[in-house]
Image (tube, grey):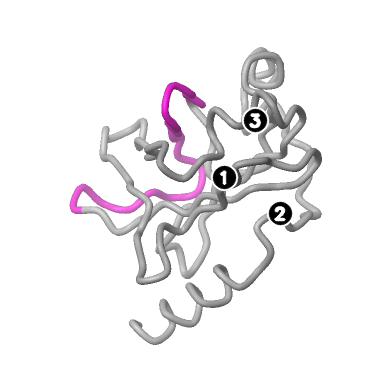
Amino acid sequence: MRTIFLIFTLVFMLAPAGCQTTSPVPTSETVPESTSTSWADEWGIEFVSLRLTASDQMLDFRYRILDPDKATKITRRPIQAYAVHDQTGAVHNIPVTKLGPLRSSALNPKINRVYVILFSNANAEGMVKRGDTMTVVIGDFRAEHLKVE
């Protein structure tokens, strides 16, 4: 298991931080409609997805940059980020490897690029399952009640 995690980590860290994805456009099932508008207005981003990955051991949160100036408030690595499982209140942190935290970061985010934050899904309170909802917090930014795909 450790070997698989290390391979996954290396692949993630070597991949370009701003890779485009073919993820579907968010729907009202995954993010409330009024939320996505306020994200663009206040934070300069739009929701792409929140999915289980790595054999359900990680939560993969993705967002697209719409306004790089506004987005710098959440893309800088020193800004703390975590996810809260709405059903249990369990906090899921970003794993930190020898290469650093498993998250995309940028001092100068690029418009239309997709950025990624991976949260651990190994938690004493139990694991998050597809269909559960999460709240993602990045500094002052809060994305509430996101449905896990």
Sequence-wise, which precedes: disc 1 or disc 3?
3
Task: Please name the residue that numbered disc 1 is placed on.
Answer: 50
Kind of residue indicated by mark 2:
Gly
Q: Residues within 10 Å of mark 1 (few under 14, many from 20)?
A: many
Q: Image point 56% across, 48% down: which residue?
A: 105
Magenta stretch: includes residue 138: yes
**Given this view, does label 1 or label 3 mark the residue nearer the observer?**
1
Q: CA distance from mark 1 to mark 2?
A: 17 Å
Which of 147 and 119 lies nearest the eye of the viewer? 119
Kind of residue indicated by mark 3:
Glu
Kind of residue indicated by mark 1:
Leu
**Quadrant position of the N terminus in the picture:** bottom left
> Bounds of the magenta span?
124-144
Q: Residues within 10 Å of mark 2 (few under 14, many from 20)?
A: some
Residue 114 pos. (x, y %): 71, 47
Task: Please name the residue that numbered disc 3 is placed on.
Answer: 29
**Residue projecting furthest to the left:** 124
Q: Is residue 123 left or right of residue 69?
A: left
Residue 55 pos. (x, y %): 47, 69
**Residue projecting furthest to the bottom:** 3
**Given this view, does label 2 or label 3 mark the residue nearer the observer?**
2
Quarter of the image where one finds residue 82 = top left
Q: CA distance from mark 1 to mark 3?
A: 12 Å
Height in image: 102 above or below 148? below
**Given this view, does label 1 or label 2 mark the residue nearer the observer?**
2
Q: Image point 42% across, 28% down: which residue?
A: 139
Q: Is residue 65 left or right of residue 131?
A: right
Sequence-wise, which precedes: disc 1 or disc 2?
2
Q: Image point 44% across, 35% down: which residue?
A: 134
Check if mark 1's residue and mark 3's residue have beta carbons within 8 Å: no
Task: Please name the residue that numbered disc 2 is placed on.
Answer: 18
